[in-house]
Each structure stands twice: as C-alpha cells, then as structure tokens.
Amino acid sequence: MQVKKNVEVFNQDILQGQGYKYTTDDRLSTRLANARMTQGIREATDWHGKSVLDIGCGDGTFTHTLIQMGAAKILGLDPASAAIEKAMQGAKGNPLVHFDVGNVYQLDALQQKFDIVVFRGVLHHLPDAASAVKMAAKVAGEIVILEPNGANPVLKGIEKLSSYHRLHEEQSFLPSTIRKWCSEAGAVSTYSRYINLVPIFCPSALAHLLKFIEPLVERVPFLRNIACGQIVIRAAVSR
C-alpha cells in the first residue's frame, strides 16, 4: 500500500482541529475560494443521477456538495482514518453518502464501477499521482480533477516556502502533465478550465479585490494560465 507520511499529518489535523483547516476556517477568503472551486466542479460535468467515487474525501465536507449537484450515490474514500470517522459522523441519516478508509491504489478491491471519479485537490498530496489516475480510469467512465495550478508562480513559491504546505508534502503539477496522465490512463480530456483568483487564508481586503477582478482574469488567455489558482479537467474514459 502506497501511503505518504502526510496521512498521519492529516489525521492529526482532524484530531486537533475537529476538521481540516481549509474546511473549518470561516474567513472570507476561505469561503470565497472554496465556493469557486465547488462551482468549478459543478460546471465540469452533469452530476445528476450519477454514481460518484470521491477519492481523498477528507472530512467529507465537499463530498456532500456532490449530492447538492444531483449525484445519486456517493462513496468517499480516504486513507486518513480520523478524517473518515469525522465524515461518517456528518453523514448520519443520509443514505446517499457512504465513507470508508481506502487507498486509491487498491480500487480493484472495491469490485464496483462508478459513473464518475472525482479528485478534488488530492493528486498533489499523493506519492504517485499518475498511477492514481490510471486506477480511477479502471473503475469509472469519467474522471473530474481539480488541482492547484502548477503554472502559477506565486502558488509554486508558497508551496516551497510555507511550512504548512511542506508539512503536508504538497507538489502541484502543470495542467499539461495532468492531461498527459489522463491520456496514458486511456481517458481523453474533454474539458479544461482555469478558475479562482482568491487564495485560501488571505486578508479580507485582498480577497474582495481579487474576487472583483476574478471573472475578467478567468476569461483572458495566458493571464488565466498563470494567475488562476486551480485547474479543472474532465476526462472521458475510452473502453
């Protein structure tokens, strides 16, 4: 089983903070950034009536947004047992959502097929992201990926200098690299969009300004490629 040291770090995050910092933090920038990422995933495909496998679901906060998008059945998997325990507590009474401790490199053990596999901010935490995409392609007809934009120089700087990012072993990738992994897994990229200008955990005044200019930046070629914080990719698996 391939597991990075950061799994224990994520477990400690849950135990110490009753949830992940990026899901429990209530500052404006966090709320704006998370909302834009959720919207980006919503726009990537038609979720209505679909069975979904949410890889790296964490504490389950964003898994529940998939139900709001119309998904019919969701399984959330994460290697961090404390995160899954938290997710299960939040899912009580909802028969559409299930959570389990699991490893993306052992999806064959599920013996299930899904309409969609979603990776929301997960690949940059994994020891072998390319193999994770290949495993996803074996169990679903479609893959939706949201990842930090590895072409953003500010993001790359934060990734290298921030103790939080280093502790969680974050390593963002170029969008072209992610599309290549999809192709190698037998999945054809059919949708790609750069989104979001607001960093999580930034001052509110800056968040207001960035949110105001965000729609313009997202529309401008080249500028969006290096300024937006995330990339959303949809890939259809060819059988």
Image: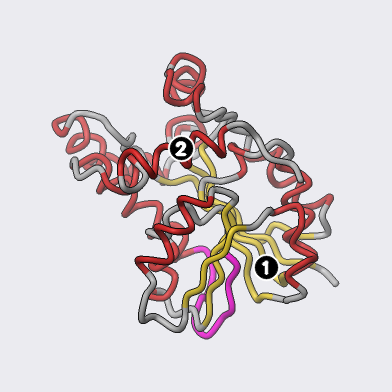
In the foreground, 83 or 38:
83
Residue 222, horizontal then vertical, whole percent: 51, 34
Tell me the element at label 1: strand
Which secondary structure class fits the magenta region best?
Answer: loop
The amino acid sitting under disc 2 is: Arg
Residue drawn 79% across and 54% down?
134
Residue drawn 42% across and 18% down?
162
Tell me the element at label 2: helix
**Residue beneath label 2, please?**
224
Residue 228, horizontal then vertical, whole percent: 43, 37
**Residue beneath label 1, please?**
142
Which region of the structure is painted magenta?
Answer: 44-53
Mark 1, other Cα within 10 Å: few <14 / some 14–19 / many ≥20: many
Residue 236, horizontal then vertical, whole percent: 71, 66
Q: Is residue 108 above or below residue 146?
A: below
Residue at the top extreme of this rendering = 161
The amino acid sitting under disc 1 is: Glu
- Mark closest to the chain's N terminus, 1 or 2: 1
Residue 20, horizontal then vertical, whole percent: 37, 44
When asked about the image quadrant of residue 234, the answer is: bottom right
Q: Is residue 217 magenta?
A: no
